[in-house]
Amino acid sequence: MEIKSLSPEISVAPQVTIADLNAVARAGFRSVICNRPDGEGADQPVYAELEREARDQGLQIRYLPAESGKVTDAQGVAFGALMAELPKPVLAFCRTGMRSTTMWALSQAANMQLPQIVEKASKAGFDLKGVVRRIANGGKTPVEVSDAMHDVVIVGGGAAGISVASSLLARKPDLNIAIIDPADIHYYQPGWTLVGAGVFDAAVTARTMAAVLPKGVHWIKSAVAAFEPERNAVILDGCRVVKYQQLVVCPGLKLDWQGIEGLSETLGRNGVTSNYRYDLAPYTWRLVQELKRGCAIFSQPPMPIKCAGAPQKAMYLSADHWRRSGVLSSIDIQFCNAGAVLFGVADYVPALMEYVRTYGIGLNFGQTLVSVDGPAKKAVFSANNPDGTNEFITREFDMLHAVPPQRAPDFIRISPLADAAGWVDIDPGTLRHKEFVNIFALGDVGNTSNAKTAAAARKQAPVVAHNLLVTRGDVQGEVKYDGYGSCPLTVERGKIVLAEFTYGGKVSPSFPKWLIDGTKPSALAWYLKERVLPPLYWDGMLKGREWLAQPEMVG
């Protein structure tokens, strides 16, 4: 008998025998639910036998049988009623545990979010993809009706989603395209680094979603609950169904603020900030201006993260302000990086190290922020030592710029589209899903090894647009994405080390070396970041104008 836990209150198991009930009681269970009908198999005891032995063992037991593959909505409700009635913890069983797990999932649909239900079941070894619609519908079987049907459905209205919609329409204006996104505001996130340095006002990085959506695109203002790729369907919150011929998945990633103990409770106060949030970037600038002496810590979590250079961009610009204000010598700057190197492409490290030395920054590799006590001004890091051991280091701070761990959105991680790590499983060149040929992904949500930056999405959008139309039979010849990403490293106000690279860390400059040498600080690169890239984003990338981003045919 293999017992699998779904929660502290409920576990499931395959067929329980009379002899097993003693072990069940000794394991601490107080109640048992039998979900297997009598006579289903020649090797199972009948319920009456189990009932007598359970009572002898001091266990409560109930009979709620369901046919294999035919768990009803009413049985889900009845299971919930039994869970409310019976002493905990409870062990439920059937032939394999699947029917018991399904009843539990349906009973929890009104109280627990779909991703959590599916993830708990998955960890116990049960795949609930066959009942996700029912769970999304509050534990009830939905009416089999599609709310909408589109040629192309795009999940996500961020940089990647808007760009690929515009690129598609530039190639085929009559496409019926829908974008699914619940957000009211679209943000130019690369600008938040400069907001945190007092260069930009936060308001210039935000526009309404309605203002940036391409003309003619349908906006479905809802969150996605699940995918049914075998049926070409996206399930929305509330169990509404949207059908597609081709699907593009680009909802970005999830900033896991809860992944660092105490962080969410102290963000925006006690000297704790992050440029990874629109509302906090102005607080970063306020802290930088107010700090005259003390310790400033800048953290970076394990990869992958959105714009891997952003944590140190904030650090360099802060240090530059303190230098210009004459207080740099009174401030201890510490960079605590979960990784093993300053930057992943070695060609750019020498220039960065010059600034590390100039600003007197302490480098602490292999250190991951795990908890923050804002009122006490203390941060705890998990440190990996060279000998393989691990220790916890407590650091006091006056200012902490924290970057949260990052992962794929919950509805992606539990979906059939995800790889083992939770990211959408796509071919690194074509950006097509490895299993479902009419599904593509781009931006931060894909499992490709490129840097997760807006510059990468700018290059990916035309590739997805073209290859999607190849799938539809509208154009011929495949194109491939080369892994291009760009990270304008703001090493001081007025100068940038412009890192540009493709898969494998191969340096890939967009400009001749005599104009901008990306391995050295450049005033022209700063001008590009401050003055050129914002309008290029709003009026170029989001409008389907593929300047310096035209995909190349392969073969």
Image (spheres, rainbow, N blue to C red):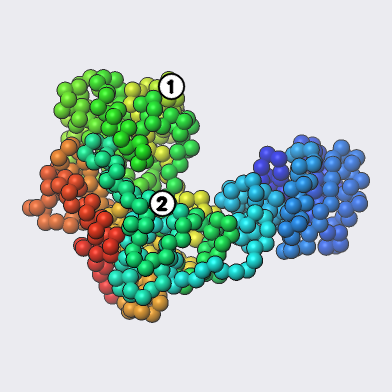
List x then y, in percent, for residue 456: 30, 56
Q: Looking at the figure, which quarter contains the C terminus?
A: bottom left
In the figure, is residue 480 to the left or right of 64? left
Q: Which residue is mark 2?
A: 184
Q: Nearer the viewer, mark 1 or mark 2?
A: 2
Q: Secondary structure at mark 1?
A: loop
The vertical placement of 359 against 184, above or below, is: above
In the picture as drawn, the residue positioned furthest to the left comes out as 514
Q: Nearer the viewer, residue 226 or 21?
A: 226
Q: Amino acid at mark 1?
A: Pro
The vertical placement of 167 against 291, above or below, is: below
Q: Based on the displayed image, in which of its 4 quarters is residue 550 positioned? A: bottom left
Q: Based on the displayed image, in which of its 4 quarters is residue 475 positioned? A: bottom left
In this view of the protein, can residue 359 be seen by the observer?
Answer: no
In this view of the protein, can residue 49 be seen by the observer?
Answer: yes
Q: Secondary structure at mark 2?
A: loop
Q: Amino acid at mark 2?
A: Asp
Q: Based on the displayed image, in which of its 4 quarters is residue 497 positioned? A: top left
List x then y, in percent, for residue 3: 71, 46
Q: Which residue is mark 1?
A: 375
